[in-house]
Image (cartoon, grey):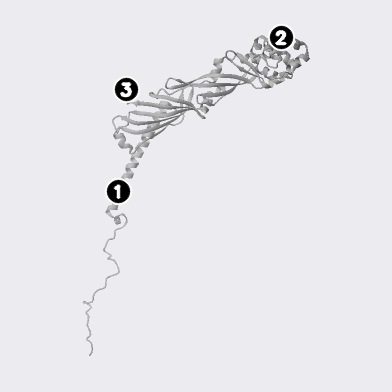
Amino acid sequence: MRSPVRMFSPLSRPSPQSDHPDPERKVPRGFARVPRTRKVVIGLLLGAALLVLVDRCAVMYAEQRAEQTLQRKLGPAAAPEVNIHGFPFLTQVLGKRLDGVDVTLRDVPADQVSLAKIRAEATDIRLFGDLPLPVDGARAAQVDGDVLLSFDDLERDIGASHVRFSALDGNSVRAAGELPVAGWQVRIHALAHLRRDGDRGVATSVSGMWLDVPGIATYRPGRPARLRLHSEAAERISRDRTKARALLAVPSVARQLGVAPEATRLALRDDKALSRIMERPGFTDRLMRANLVDLVSDHPEALEGAGVDPVAARALMRLPVRELSERVAFSFHLPKQAKGLRLRNITVEREGIRADLTGSGLAVGTARRADS
């Protein structure tokens, strides 16, 4: 039996789905395709970044203004550095209080020298002024830091004396330099001991000064003054009868050399007796310990006979002790503009003299005028 043939009308045949999108349909592109939640997040992030940028620009401007003010008032050779703590800055300004500010100053004039570095950290700072307009005053609850007077700066500021400074111990500085005296190139040595000058300054007292003529003699001013031979000069005399006899001819020197008067008289006219004295053990050491100050004025011929120029020795001894001390003494005080700051714990370190800096209630601008 033949199966019936099914007849399909073209109108009744199901139309297959098209593989091509409707050309009339709009497809989202770019940012429009981002979900709404993500758009909100991105917007918030951009807004936050903009606020941070504005805040950082504001703090940089404030730091620059503060640096310019410090440069104008204190006159340091190098530009000051100011770093304002805390974030955000603008909310601190609106609240009229800053968390803290770091200030670094270099090469600040301080009397006869310059301070290599002043570092201070001010905390809990109250601002004055019709904010958010420019701040016209501030008061810091606490200030801490330190001050450094470097040896390099000392050598530069007291350079006319050609003095070099170095640490001796925690409270003293060793000074050494050179100066010409009557044809001699004299080396000057001294110790400068630190002492407080009030609570804002440091001064020094000088001791242990001595002037050295290399290879000849050392002169120590003071009471009593002392002029003593170097080992080289003493050895030359101990080998030269003429020089030794010139010194033995002065009774005060003969006594210091431990030679009895009778032996001295014999040695002055007999070479063998003189040789026995010169060959005694310790003769050279006694020559080095003998004080020849009296020979400068009373017996210059004996000094010259011993190989020491009496004119140069006289010029050396006439140098005023006060003037010599001023060549190695120094002092410094905190700038007058830095009122309210004090120094403490002053010590000598390898690079220079350091002191702690402290203060409270430090006021500037209108805050200072309010206190007066």
Q: Secondary structure at mark 1?
A: helix
Q: Residue at 62% across / 17% down in the picture?
A: 219
Task: Please state the total of marks drawn on the protein image.
Answer: 3
Q: Nearer the viewer, residue 165 or 223?
A: 223
| Earlier residue among tags 1 and 2 | 1
Task: Describe residue 249's horizontal placement relative to residue 115 as left or right.
Answer: right
Q: Which mark is residue 43?
A: 1
Whether 219 is drawn above or below 139: the answer is above
The residue to which callout 3 is attached is 371
Whether 247 is drawn above or below 65: the answer is above
Quadrant for the C terminus, please: top left
Q: Tell me whether circle 1 and circle 2 mark residues in contact (CB < 8 Å).
A: no
Q: Is residue 156 visible?
A: no
- As shown in the figure, which amino acid type bears the numbered disc 1? Gly
Q: Position of residue 210 (x, y in %)?
A: 59, 19
Q: Position of residue 316 (x, y in %)?
A: 62, 16
Q: Secondary structure at mark 2?
A: helix
- Which of the two marks, 2 or 3, is nearer to us in this view? 2
| Earlier residue among tags 3 and 1 | 1
Q: Residue 138 occupies which quadrant of the picture?
A: top left
